Image (cartoon, grey):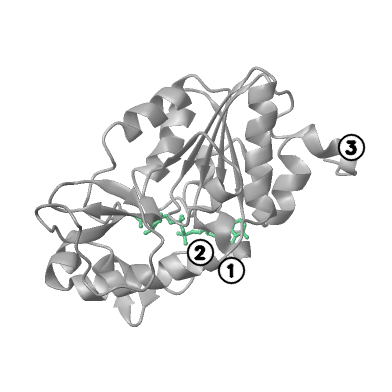
Amino acid sequence: MDWIVDTPEKKVVVMTGSGISAESGIQTFRGAHGLWENHRIEDVASPIAFRRDPVMVWNFYLQRRKQALASRPNAGHLAVSELESWVTAGGGDFLLVTQNVDGLHKRAGSRNVIEMHGSLVFSRCTACREIFPDECTDMELPPHHDCPQKGLLRPHIVWFGESLFPGDMENIESAIRSCDVFIVIGTSGTVYPAAGLVHYANSLGIRTVCVNKDAPANLDLFDIFIQGEAGTELPRRLFPGKKAEGNTP
Ligand code: OAD
């Protein structure tokens, strides 16, 4: 087995999903049969649910915010962050695109990151639209902003039925167009537009690599599939930067 990225001067795009955070104790999306307290996740993570019952939706996100803040990045997150340092120091380009909202990649040291579904540790005012870091887990619900309009706050998350944040898709596609390898980790390949990025890379003839515990829905679009847990496979196979520590491909 060769290294996924063998030399540092490459242009690399990595995309991750909830599988990379599983070893930090955060349940994957479809791991609990997609349910939270008997609600379908799609019925909680949506603008309709928030209009109907903002307190219920905030309770869901506060529980997830607490869990994310209590979790720690694992060996998979660290390997991705170390790959970025190695590639950028070697003259290459690196972009990490994550569907995860837990903030663990940034805490592991990743710098050039697009959190395409938003972040649990940010809130947004529905009136003045200000976006700000927010690690508060204990507040009167539903929370309001201290702006002149006293707007209702919402989690800074891309919900089902909403578009990605302006510019994100353009920036992601532009990085994919010029990359040498597109590495996809810990995602089932079922949620669009993220899953469609693999089609995009594949249609451009870019090398695609998948590291996942189970075969993803779009398995046939990958040139290489490494089956296993991210925390084990990434430190061993992602790049040779750790060779001195005794890891072999
Ligand atoms: P899923 O729950 O659909 O898929 C998680 C994938 O991770 C599965 O294919 C597992 O086999 C794999 N997996 C589990 N443990 C792993 C490990 N230790 N190492 C490697 N792989 C592992 O989650 P996502 O694909 O992330 O969207 O879901 C995508 C999006 O759907 C989420 O961002 C969310 C959700 O609905 C929004 O909230 C908009």
- Identified by mark 2, the residue type is Leu
Using the rendered image of the protein, determine whether residue 34 is visible from the camera's viewpoint. Answer: no
- Identified by mark 3, the residue type is Ala
Residue tagged 2:
69
In the rendering, at what x and y percent does residue 152 appear?
16, 61
Quarter of the image where the N terminus is located: top right
Where, by quadrant of the figure, is residue 8 drawn? top right
The Cα atoms of the two marked residues, 2 and 1, are separated by 11 Å
Residue tagged 3:
244
Residue tagged 1:
25
Q: Residue at x 20, y 58 (%)?
A: 145
Give SS at disc 3.
Answer: helix
- Identified by mark 1, the residue type is Gly
Camera-nearest residue between 249 and 36 = 36
Camera-nearest residue between 19 and 78 = 78
Q: Nearer the viewer, mark 2 or mark 1?
A: 2
Quarter of the image where the C terminus is located: top right
In the rendering, at what x and y percent does residue 4 appear?
69, 34
> In the image, is residue 119 above or below residue 180?
below
> In the image, is residue 117 above or below residue 32?
above
> In the image, is residue 247 above or below residue 229?
above
